[in-house]
Image: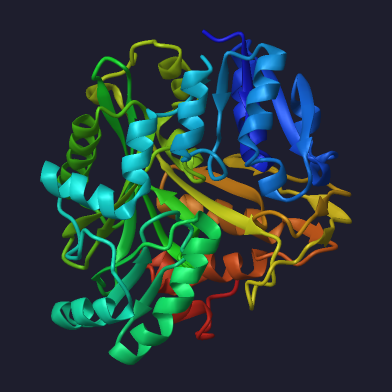
Amino acid sequence: MFKKVLIANRGEIAVRVMRTCQAMGIQTVGVYSEADKEAPHVYMADEAYLIGGPRVAESYLNMERIIEVTKLTGAEAIHPGYGLLSENASFARRCEEDGIVFIGPTPEVIARMGSKIESRKAMEETGVPVVPGITYPLADVEDAVQVAGAMGYPVMLKASAGGGGIGMQIVRSEEELRKAFGGNQKRATDFFGDGAMYVEKYVENPRHIEIQILADHFGNTVYLWERECSIQRRHQKVVEEAPSSFLDEETRRKMGECAMKAAQSLGYRNAGTVEFLVDEQKNFYFLEMNTRLQVEHPVTEEITGLDLVAEQLRIAAGETLNIEQGDVKREGHAIEVRIYAEDPKTFFPSPGKITKWEPPLGAGIRHEMAVREESMVTPYYDPMIAKLIVKGATREEAISVMEHALAHYQVEGIKTNIPMLRDVISHPAFLAGDTTTNFVANYIQSNQPPIKK
């Protein structure tokens, strides 16, 4: 096992990884920007180093500086967390070339799955069902119009690179497509340095359900059940739960086996997630593969009893998976909500100083936090400041715990999305398990009244 690991990230995920490392007796190296010098992860690390200015390009995306600090401290491995450099094939390759273990899959797999076009091709070759669409980049808007017309509206216009909903838009007519193409392509170019666009058929009222997998260096692969991540705003997840209340056991098994088949065909190793769209008839289609730890991984940990970061570390250190598929338990129900520093009505970021921060306590409540009282929320990073995870014996019990926890979450000095989350959790559609990707638009932004408790 490693003696020292550098965590090339910030915020709650840096704290999360450090917690497991330290529990395993592994020393941790933190890195931080000028804007993060007082951040919790800096104080938690056994040693921490300034790597640049406040903007991510100056610090958390500064590959040379991160490699330099890794060598300086004698860390044997880098855990990239999620976002930032976690799915950067060039960074994984640099680590490999410098004799540093990158805690994740190979650069080749990251590169292939990092392109939505290439990942679609790979899944089609493997026999995994994919949403009807194209597997080549569109030449221009006229090409897009021709393809979409032949496919039939509505379609989903997507950037091939990146994620987080950037460069993605549902279009329902040629006029909408012409308006959307240039702006989405520019955003993709600005954020990812790659403006390649493609279209696929839009699945009406879908659910976003993903399968967590683990794979070691010896060809052993298991799936750790599913997470339902359908409740989203701007194509970004805000509520996740495990297991899905929608799936039956046969569909659950088929999706898990498909995810394992996909991973094995790629020679995948470490933790990964295969994301699917599931329609109203429980037909499922490959969406993308995330070659890293997911933001929502805690709900899987809660129902399986596994520490996914510990599993990542063991796999990266060359150990064999110590569990087989039959050993993977599923117990209880877990729900996670992402707490953002943002206006709950407009979803615009709300930077500022947190003057009061009192998260709720109680049985079945877990917190992953990027801030504390007196923390400054800056405009430089993603506005997610914490995750609240709850567990109950049943979905109904988990919802009850979540309602109580959100009602007692006290934050002052900034706006948060907690009021919106309370509306979601208490809404009759959520209580009934009617959680499609259109939930926020249909029930929250349209001001349909929720149940108040």
Can you give x and y, in whole percent of width and height, for residue 395 in the image? Answer: 41, 52
Q: Is residue 140 left or right of residue 151?
A: right
Residue drawn at x 50%, y 43% is 391
Q: Is residue 354 left or right of residue 450?
A: right
Q: Is residue 377 above or below residue 176?
A: above
Residue drawn at x 26%, y 14% is 218
Can you give x and y, in whole percent of width and height, for residue 149 in the image? Answer: 19, 83
Observer-nearest residue: 200 or 363? 200
> Which image quadrant: the C terminus?
bottom right
Residue drawn at x 12%, y 44% is 125
Quarter-wise, where is residue 262 in the image? top left
Q: Is residue 380 left or right of residue 394?
A: right
Q: Is residue 258 left or right of residue 397?
A: left
The single residue placed furthest to the bottom in the displayed view is 175
Observer-nearest residue: 222 or 447? 222
Can you give x and y, in whole percent of width and height, for residue 42 in the image? Answer: 78, 32
Q: Is residue 348 above or below residue 10?
A: below
